[in-house]
Image (spheres, rainbow, N blue to C red):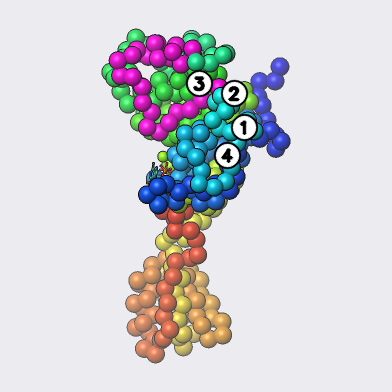
């Protein structure tokens, strides 16, 4: 028996197609977003606070309806009972009855599903040993997260939504949860994980979809997204200076902070890593300089903010 499952391009488990979600207060949380999840795949939805990650999860869960576009889970409406029974979720603001014990809650959840995961397996997967008899209200933040993770897995789901699952976990617990998530995917299960940590997305995901302001900024393998991120990081400190100047190319190249200089049709374009210093020197050297313009490299502001965290 093979123990790992390689995702194929044919097994679509869930899809958002051209989704726009506008809340009643007028906020457009998702703006024509499309996203497809395949069998055995871990996809990380990466983006800063307010990007629309939780909204995407709620739509896929059928907890919220799109303003336009289509949501499908196992090729059904997300509110379809059969589709829901194959789905597990850990919501970002996860709640549970304060007075019920961990063991009780896990078993209640198991009772909702036709073929639940064995209790002992859930305890192991979520590292609940030693806290099974405690009431939810008495748990630490990280322990609560772990119990909610067990609840998400209680039905032995084929599709799992984890909305910022590792917030509040210490490094050891975070790594343990990562290992569990990997093993779920290796058994052919599909995981959609939201996070605002590039590191987490990188450690776990087969595919990262970066969103901001409800739109996909880029997507690809972790390596692809990281290479874009690092070039963007560098770009965050770089500025483009344009002007008309009589200074020779050699002088321009030697200005403080300048990494590139080019003159075309009388217009000079400089790239500087120390904008103010470059400008001061430039203006001092050329009293007749005019048509000055300073700009950021043309990259999504959103991705700059994201990768500069
Ligand atoms: P993320 O999970 O990436 O932080 P959310 O999906 O929670 O982002 O939020 C996206 C945007 O939608 C934010 O501007 C947020 O304030 C807004 N928003 C989220 N939920 C609601 C709601 N129920 N009503 C109105 N606005 C909302
Ligand atoms: Mg969120």
- How many tags in the picture? 4
Query: Mark 3 highlights which residue?
Result: 153
What residue is shown at x 38% (from left), y 67% (from top)?
274
What residue is shown at x 45% (from left), y 81% (from top)?
243
Placement of 47 over or under 180, stated as above or below: below
Q: Earlier in the sequence, mark 1 or mark 4?
A: 4
Query: Mark 2 highlights which residue?
Result: 82
Residue 88 sits inside the magenta stretch: yes
Residue 283 can be seen, yes or no = yes
What residue is shown at x 38% (from left), y 70% (from top)?
275
Query: Mark 4 highlights which residue?
Result: 71
Q: Earlier in the sequence, mark 3 or mark 2?
A: 2
Placement of 190 over or under 20, stated as above or below: above
- Indicate the secondary structure of the residue bearing disc 4: strand
Q: CA distance from mark 1 to mark 4?
A: 8 Å
Q: CA distance from mark 2 to mark 1?
A: 9 Å
């Amino acid at each position: 028996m093979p123990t790992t499952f390689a995702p194929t391009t044919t097994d679509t488990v869930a899809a958002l197609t051209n989704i726009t979600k506008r809340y009643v207060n007028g906020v457009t949380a998702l703006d024509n977003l499309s996203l497809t999840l395949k069998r055995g795949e871990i996809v990380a939805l990466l983006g800063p606070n307010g990007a629309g990650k939780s909204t995407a999860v709620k739509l896929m869960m059928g907890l919220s309806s799109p303003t336009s576009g289509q949501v499908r889970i196992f090729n059904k409406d997300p509110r379809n009972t059969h589709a829901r029974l194959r789905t597990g979720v850990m919501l970002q603001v996860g709640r549970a009855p304060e007075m019920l014990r961990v063991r009780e809650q896990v078993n209640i959840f198991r009772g909702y599903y036709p073929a639940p995961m064995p209790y002992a397996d859930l305890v192991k997967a979520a590292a609940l040993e030693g806290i099974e008899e405690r009431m939810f209200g008495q748990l630490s933040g990280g322990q609560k997260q772990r119990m909610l993770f067990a609840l998400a897995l209680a039905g032995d789901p084929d599709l799992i939504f984890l909305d910022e699952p590792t917030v509040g976990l210490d490094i050891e617990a975070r790594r343990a949860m990562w290992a569990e998530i990997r093993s779920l995917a290796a058994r052919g299960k599909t995981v959609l994980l939201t996070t605002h940590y590039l590191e987490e997305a990188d450690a776990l995901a087969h595919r990262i979809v970066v969103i901001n302001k409800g739109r996909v900024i880029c997507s690809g393998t972790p390596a692809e997204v990281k290479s874009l991120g690092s070039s963007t990081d560098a770009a965050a400190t770089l500025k483009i200076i344009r002007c008309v100047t009589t200074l020779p190319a050699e002088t321009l190249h030697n200005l403080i902070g300048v990494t590139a200089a080019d003159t075309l049709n009388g217009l000079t374009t400089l790239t500087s890593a120390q904008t103010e210093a470059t400008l001061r020197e430039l203006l001092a050297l050329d009293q007749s300089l005019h048509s000055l313009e300073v700009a950021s490299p043309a990259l999504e502001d959103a991705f700059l903010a994201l990768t500069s965290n």
